[in-house]
Amino acid sequence: MYAYELLESGCHYLIQEKENDPISLIKINMASDHCVYVSFFGMEEEIKWKRKSDLIFDIIELLSDDAVRAWESSYNNNAFNYEEDEE
């Protein structure tokens, strides 16, 4: 088991919060003395505070800058296409 306190601000990670949960892509936006402000990326971005002591089952990977750019390109393109389909 790991905790959010191990994750660095400004970095993207693939994690599994609980043992049987799907893999999640997160970004640590900032850290305070006791908490981190985290973006969770799924169909929509969800941003919430987590205690640094909150447990994470597995930190699978710290994404490289190249991987983040590739993901952002795909994620933003999919979001743009979704908005067009709504009209």
Image: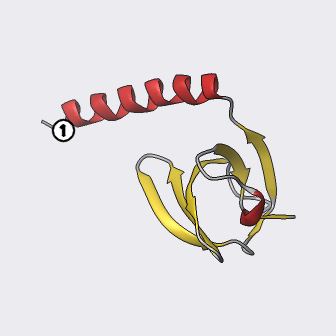
Image quarter in which the N terminus is found: bottom right
**Nearer to us in this view, 45 or 11:** 11
Say if 4 sits above or below 62 in the image.
Answer: below
Say if 14 sits above or below 4 in the image.
Answer: above
- Amino acid on which disc 1 is placed: Glu
Q: Position of residue 52 (x, y in %)?
A: 70, 71
Q: Secondary structure at mark 1?
A: helix
| Left or right: 1 as drawn, with respect to 35 | right
Mark 1: few/some/many CA within 10 Å (<14, 14-19, 20+): few
Residue holding disc 1 = 86
Q: Residue furthest front?
A: 33
**Nearer to us in this view, 6 or 54:** 6
**Image quadrant where residue 54 sits:** bottom right
**Image quadrant where residue 35 sits:** bottom right
Q: How many marks?
A: 1
Say if 49 sits above or below 73 in the image.
Answer: below
| Left or right: 5 as drawn, with respect to 66 | right
**Nearer to us in this view, 76 or 42:** 76
| Left or right: 57 as drawn, with respect to 51 | right
Q: Residue furthest right?
A: 1
Q: Position of residue 67 (x, y in %)?
A: 62, 26
> Residue drawn 49% across and 67% down?
48
